[in-house]
Amino acid sequence: MAELSTIARPYAEALFGAAKGADLNAVLAEVDALAVAAQLPEVAQLAINPQVGDTQLADVLSAAVKGGLSAVGKQFVATVVANGRVAALPAIARQFRHLKNASEGNADALIESAFALESAQVQELVVALEKKFAVKLKPQVSVNPALIGGVCVTVGDQVLDSSVRAQLDQMRVALAA
C-alpha cells in the first residue's frame, strides 16, 4: 500500500482548492476534528466493516465536528469515505495545515527543550528562526528531558538539533569510526 502521505496529498490539495473562498481556519478546524475521529478504534472498525454503508460512516465522522460540517466539509467527507481513505484523514489534516500555512507565509515550529523556556527566550529563538527560514513561525514549545540540554527545532521537514543528546551521539559516532 502507498504511503499515507502520498495518498493524502491529492485530497489535501483538492480540499484546499475547494476551500479557497471559505474561512481556511474553519476548514482546518473541521479537518482536524475529522482526523481525531478517524484515529478512534471504533471509527477504524466501522470503516472496515462491510455492513456499514458510506452514508452511515460519513454521518459518524460528521458528528465528530462540533457545530457540524460546512458544505465543503460534507463533500470532502463523502469523497474520503467513498474512496475508502478514512485512515488517511490525519495525514490529510497535516498536509492541509501545511498548505494553509504556506499560502499565508507561515510555518509551524516545534521547539523541544530540555528545560522549560521563558517567553522571552522563546521569542528570541523564534525571531532568529524566522530570519533563517524566511517565514513567520507559529511556535509550539514542549519539554523533553531526554535532550539533556539545548533545543531541537522542527520546521516542516527540517530539523535543527543543537541538543546535548545530539552532540553526544555525534561524538559517539566519531569515536566509533
Image: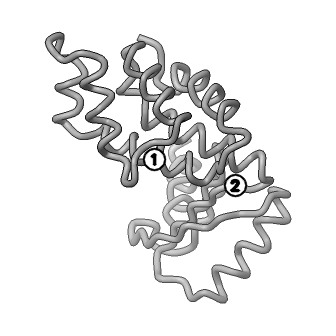
Residue drawn at (46%, 67%) of the image: 147
User: What residue is at 42 percent from the left and 68 percent from the top?
Assistant: 144
Residue 107 bears which disc, if any? 2
Residue 53, which numbered label? none
Drawn side of residue 10 relative to residue 20, left or right: left
Question: Counting residues from the N terminus, which is met first, the one under dot 1 or under dot 2?
Answer: 1
The one nearer the camera, 163 or 38, is: 38
Looking at the picture, which amino acid does disc 2 mark? Ala
Could you say which is closer to the camera, residue 159 or residue 102?
102
Please state if 81 lies on the left or on the right of 74 as rendered.
left
Give how far across and how far down residue 52 sits, in percent.
18, 17
Graded by Cα atoms within 10 Å as few (under 14), some (14 to 19) or many (20 or more), the crowding at tag 2 reads many
Circles 1 and 2, Cβ within 8 Å, touching? The answer is: no
- Give the alpha-carbon distance from disc 1 to disc 2, as whole Å: 17 Å
Q: Which mark is residue 32?
A: 1
Check the image and name the residue furthest to the front.
Answer: 71
* Residue 118 position in % (x across, y down): 57, 88
Give the residue type at disc 1: Asp
Q: Nearer the viewer, residue 168 or 151?
A: 151
Q: Considering the image in quadrants, where does the C terminus appear? A: top right
Q: Secondary structure at mark 2?
A: strand
